[in-house]
Image: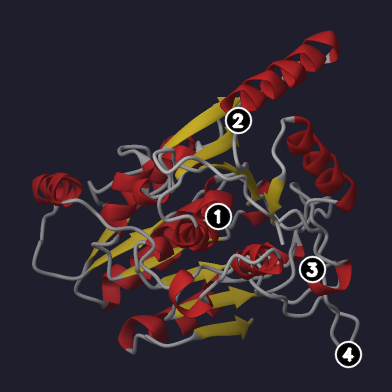
Amino acid sequence: MPTLPVRKPDQKQRVLVYLFGSLGDSIVAIPALRAVRRHFPNAEIVILHDFASTKLVAASEVIPSQLFDRHMSYGSTAQGARRVLDFYELLRRVRAEKFDAAVYAVMSERPPRSVIRDKYFFRACGIKALYGFHAIPPEKLWPVDADGHPGVSDHEAEFRLARLSIDGIKTEPQSDLQTPLFEFSAEALARVDSWLRDRRKRPGVPLYSIAPGCKTEANLWPLENFVDIGKRILAKYDCEIMITGGPAEFETAERLALALGTELNAAGVFAVHTSSALMSRSHLHIGLDTGTTHLAAAAGTCCFAIFGERNNPGAWYPLGQGHTIVYHRVPCANCKTQMCPIRDHPCMLGISADAVWTHLDRALSSPNKNGIEVVAV
């Protein structure tokens, strides 16, 4: 087990948490950060994250403020000699902070060679107590069922908790994984309620949210299908529909909003935490395998999610209970590609609007509050 250096009674322990990736990566790291805060209740916890791309949401914008004290950012887009200089500059900055411990909260698919390299980097920064620097075996990351098809894996959040427990950080999965992951301030809730009040035509009916966009092209479902589904919802149920998503998805969201006759286009309107507060007002969120779905689930909202098969089932499902996952089984599953190389993109285009409606209609009329229902169509 890692041993922390002894500090004077009036000095706080200083713990560095290494985390990078997309919005979804940061959200599924929250359970691990809960365990870290519980293990180091009085420490100064600092998040080190890569914020080189404006397309990424900084982890410090996502992680609840009570789980960390401040953050350090670095960029990694430079090449050649500049990249080497940036590496040594980061090493100098981290070393100067004199951290007592470093916690590894990155995605579990990080290759073993990269995990070892990262471990040596933090050792070179003078940090002796290292937690979570373990590669997950391939057979656990990518299990295979009896038919040779990708099998159900543990959730990514569970993998991160398991890595910490190896090094003596006590995890409490039942509470660490509990949603909602956020606590919303009265100010944030008042802000989103004001936004809704100004735009809702029928504030007394249920509100459903739809997010038609996503960052990964291979996870997209045709916009015309979302239009079809939205119109069916409005035709059968006494409700209003709100469109959500990130700033990059505003135009797609606006096209859907116009087609459905709603003025509730919230794509890119609010910062991450406030967007989650907005989605907490939704009775059900309908989306894809993307950060917006994770954000809705983190708010405690039940999700109806349309997934492809580019990852093992289970690894990236939304956290919490009451969700429905719809997918289409294909022979090319677990491809990991960002863009599907097959013309008809079978794992997403093989999911028809009719098939989705069959199961969405049931979810709307008889909400499931327990467990996760996974349906092959």
From mark 1 to mark 2, how far is it between C-alphas?
36 Å
Depth check, mark 1 against mark 2: the one in front is: 2
**Residue at mark 3:** 141
In the picture shown, does residue 337 fall above or below 326?
A: above
Q: Quadrant of the N terminus?
A: bottom right
Depth check, mark 3 against mark 4: the one in front is: 3
Label whose residue precedes the other's in the sequence (2 or 3) = 2
From mark 3 to mark 4, how far is it between C-alphas?
16 Å
From mark 4 to mark 2, how far is it between C-alphas?
50 Å
| In the foreground, 178 or 312 | 178
Q: Considering the numbered disc 3 on the image, is that residue within a helix, a strand or a loop?
A: helix
Label whose residue precedes the other's in the sequence (3 or 4) = 3
Q: Considering the numbered disc 1 on the image, is that residue within a helix, a strand or a loop?
A: loop
Label whose residue precedes the other's in the sequence (1 or 2) = 2
Depth check, mark 2 against mark 3: the one in front is: 2
Q: Quadrant of the C terminus?
A: bottom right
**Residue at mark 4:** 146
In the picture shown, does residue 43 fall above or below 122?
A: below
Q: Considering the numbered disc 4 on the image, is that residue within a helix, a strand or a loop?
A: loop
Label whose residue precedes the other's in the sequence (1 or 4) = 4
Q: Which residue is located at x 87 percent, y 67 percent?
A: 138
Specify the quadrant of the image occupied by residue 135: bottom right
**Residue at mark 1:** 290
The label number, if any, that marks residue 98 in the structure image: 2
